[in-house]
Structure formats: structure tokens, C-alpha cells
Image (spheres, rainbow, N blue to C red):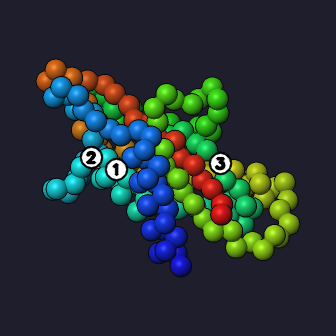
Amino acid sequence: MNTLLSTFSLLLGLTFFLTTAPLAAQSGDALPTLREMPEGTNPQRHLLQTFYEQVKFPKVAQEARRGGAYLLTITIDPSGASTWTAVPLTASTKPANPINLAVVAADRTAGATVSGQMKVNADRALIEETERMGRYLVDIGFTPAVRQGTPVADSLQLAVYYRME
């Protein structure tokens, strides 16, 4: 069942991603690319597969039936060094063209009571998972964006939507 849920999350994320924010270089320019890309894979697919292979919907958030939206911004400088920030996604933090990623978990709580402290712990776990993914992707590393043949600073904005079904 976990494999089925992971596969469903991956397919949902791929659909969400491909319909909202394709990464497409124009006129020979290149966008930042996650390193360690297998031959024959495109940059979008590699980023998505890497993300969905590692992301986990926190158990405490599942037990509290909590979801949420978080913005993970990865900034890559011209040398390829990268940093990340993760914040709750709000109207004031919503970027124009994020890469949208859905992380879905089945609701197996059977309507159990959820306390306020459970919600607080769940929200903390969701931001911590988003931060963990930021560290993970930055640890792999990125090749910098290229404009007119020169490496330049750029960023990727990932909108991560955790949802219970």
C-alpha cells in the first residue's frame, strides 16, 4: 500500500508539475539543473524523481490529519553553490511560477480526535520535512543557470502541497 501511495503521489506530482511550471530553456540558455542526472533523463524528470523518492509525509501530520503548503526556494550562484529556505506558503510568499509538488497521504485515522498540540506538532513536522528536502537537494548540488554562455545566479521555487485523502 505504501508503494501504491508513493506511486500515486509521484504521478500526481508529475501531472501537477508538467501542467503548471515546465522548465524550458530558451535560445540556448540553461536553467539550474540538479546534479547526478542519469543519462537519458531530462532535468525536470530528474528533479521530480529525486524529490518523490525522498519526501515523506510525516507520520505525526498524518495522525493529526494535517496538510499544508510550503515554499522551498533553492538559490544557485554562478559557481554552483546553493542554499535553501523553506517557509509556509501564503499569499505574500506565493511566487509567480513555482514548481508545484503534491505529497498525498491516505487518511487512516478513522476520525480520531485531534488536539491543538497535535496540530502544532504536525505543522512543525511538515515544515521540518520541507527543510529536510531542501538540505537533501542542496547536498546533491546544482549546476548553475547559463545565460548567453555565462553561468549566472538563479533560483528554483518549489511549492510543496501536503494533503490528506
Judge left or right: residue 5 versus residue 117.
left
Q: Are marks 2 and 1 in contact (CB under 8 Å)?
A: yes
Please, what is the three-letter code of the amino acid marked with disc 1? Leu
Q: In this view, does 62 lie to the left or right of 116?
A: left
Instruction: Return the x and y of residue 134 as percentages of the image width and height.
Output: 45, 45
Residue at 70% across, 73% down: 108
Number of numbered discs visible in the structure rendering: 3
Query: Is 90 on the left-hand or right-hand side of 6?
Result: right
Q: Which mark is residue 68?
A: 3
Q: Position of residue 154 (x, y in %)?
A: 34, 27
Q: Quadrant of residue 51?
A: bottom left
Question: Which residue is depicted at the point 34% across and 50% down?
Answer: 47
Residue type indicated by callout 3: Gly
| Cα–Cα gap, marks 1 and 3 | 21 Å
Q: Give above or below for 39 relative to 108.
A: above
Q: Is residue 157 above or below residue 117?
A: above
Question: What residue does disc 1 label?
Answer: 47
Residue indicated by mark 2: 43
